[in-house]
């Protein structure tokens, strides 16, 4: 029988930057990232800011999430962020769209429990859209926007980073302004010369990696989708819109091996938002916001065969479509977090769920 998911509010902030999640050796964490709004400085040809990173975890499923560590992190100015941990390395991909479109930061973690961002400076790589692919980005003149740095067609949105379990590499995925998904592989220290894949109509790309193949999850946008004017971070004029959820399987060269419409073929339905956490054994935990704009629902699924079958673990009704959704899972536990923007600030809610063995 499907269980009800009981979300608990565990944090409130007026300076919210983003909510991320990571899977570490000692469990799954939610990570709140907040602006500190201190005087910016120049670093690696980019303006930086100081941010607060708080890691949250639960002692066991059903318990409330509690803060386990806090760090002050200096990094290039950011709009949103994603994070991943593997082989004692913490990787964070941040959307900036100022001097550069995005940055990949990599820290060597000190073996300790709980996880904490080190005080040492991270390795830093900038990511920008190359001229060839920027020329393929179609931004209608009526939907262009004013910028003081990068031109609209060179902006990158919706950062996502995933780590390989058996090697010191990550997969970086972002969107162009017209909902192309661009995917790179990186070792965190050397700038990739070419992207792995450049796919049209792939909104909010999120990768999971296993051996020599990669699953890329994404929503399928309506024609002529403008990320800038649909995003709640910027214009948000369209409001939340439920769209089909798809995945594509890519090989190591970025070639599409297959594509599956999860909304139709797996019964997930159209979704307002999603997040996925996978491991090297083909297990996936998928969180989605489905239902209607007036009556949205959070649903959590488990797959042990790389999405071919989805077991619904739980669901709950929500008061509104949240601003952010994220999930991270270990072999036995998943943490789900979401964020609402309210009058008193941003409210962060979460739940810790048992997956069994």
Image (cartoon, helix red, strand yellow):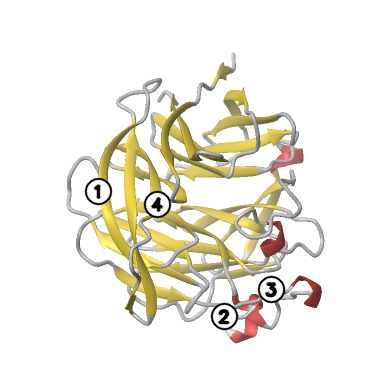
The percent coordinates of residue 137 (x first, y second) are 70, 76
Instruction: Please name the residue that numbered disc 2 is placed on.
Output: 148
Label 2: which secondary element: loop
Give the quarter of the figure containing the N terminus: top right
Position of residue 117 relative to residue 327, above or below, is: below
**Along the polypeptide, which appears first: circle 1 or circle 3?**
1
Residue 230 appears left or right of 90: right
Label 3: which secondary element: loop
Instruction: Please name the residue that numbered disc 3 is placed on.
Output: 145
CA separation in Å, label 1 and label 3 = 38 Å
Which residue is farthest top? 1
Instruction: Please name the residue that numbered disc 4 is placed on.
Output: 34
The percent coordinates of residue 211 (x first, y second) are 44, 55
Query: Badges 3 and 4: C-beta atoms under 8 Å apart?
Result: no
Which residue is farthest left? 111
Label 4: which secondary element: strand
Q: Is residue 166 visible?
A: no
Give the quarter of the figure containing the C terminus: top left
Comparing labels 1 and 3, the label whose residue is closer to the camera: 3
Q: Residue at x 35, y 56 (%)?
A: 36
Instruction: Please name the residue that numbered disc 1 is placed on.
Output: 116
Position of residue 257 relative to residue 64, above or below, is: below
Residue 296 appears left or right of 158: right
**Along the polypeptide, which appears first: circle 4 or circle 1?**
4
Query: Badges 4 and 2: C-beta atoms under 8 Å apart?
Result: no
**Along the polypeptide, which appears first: circle 1 or circle 2?**
1
Comparing labels 4 and 1, the label whose residue is closer to the camera: 4
Q: Residue at x 50, y 75 (%)?
A: 98
Please tell me which residue lies in front, 31 or 302.
31
Instruction: Give residue 186's quadrant in the image.
Output: bottom left
Please tell me which residue lies in front, 235 or 130.
235
CA separation in Å, label 4 and label 1 = 15 Å
């Amino acid at each position: 029988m499907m269980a009800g998911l009981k979300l608990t509010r565990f944090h409130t902030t007026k300076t919210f930057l983003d909510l991320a999640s990571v899977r570490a050796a000692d469990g799954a964490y939610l990570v709140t990232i907040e602006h500190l709004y201190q005087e910016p400085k120049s670093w690696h040809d980019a303006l930086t800011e100081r941010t607060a990173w708080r890691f949250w975890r639960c002692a066991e499923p059903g318990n409330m999430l509690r803060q386990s560590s806090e760090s002050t992190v200096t990094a290039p100015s950011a709009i949103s962020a994603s994070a991943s941990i593997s082989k004692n390395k913490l990787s964070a991909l941040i959307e900036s769209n100022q001097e550069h479109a995005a940055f990949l930061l990599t820290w060597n973690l000190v073996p300790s429990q709980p996880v904490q961002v080190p005080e040492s400076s991270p390795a830093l790589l900038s990511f920008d859209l190359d001229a060839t692919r920027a020329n393929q980005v179609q931004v209608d003149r009526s939907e262009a926007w004013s910028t003081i740095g990068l031109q609209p067609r060179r902006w990158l949105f919706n950062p996502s980073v995933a780590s390989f379990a058996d090697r010191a590499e990550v997969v970086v995925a972002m969107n162009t302004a017209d909902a192309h998904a661009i995917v790179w592989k990186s070792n965190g220290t050397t700038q990739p010369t070419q992207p792995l894949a450049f796919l049209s109509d792939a909104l909010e790309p999120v990768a999971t990696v296993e051996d020599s193949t990669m699953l890329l999850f994404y929503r399928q946008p309506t024609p002529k989708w403008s990320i800038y004017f649909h995003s709640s971070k910027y214009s948000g004029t369209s409001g939340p819109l439920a769209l089909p959820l798809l995945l594509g399987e890519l090989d190591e060269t970025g070639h599409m091996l297959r594509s599956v419409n999860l909304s139709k073929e797996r019964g997930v339905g159209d979704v307002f938002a999603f997040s996925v956490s996978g491991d090297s054994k083909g297990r996936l935990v998928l969180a989605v916001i489905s239902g209607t704009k007036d009556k949205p629902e959070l649903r959590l699924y488990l797959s042990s065969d790389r999405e071919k079958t989805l077991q619904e673990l739980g669901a709950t009704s929500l008061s509104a479509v949240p601003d952010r959704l994220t999930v991270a899972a270990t072999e036995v536990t998943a943490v789900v977090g979401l964020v609402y923007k309210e009058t008193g600030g941003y409210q962060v809610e979460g739940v810790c769920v048992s997956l069994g063995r």
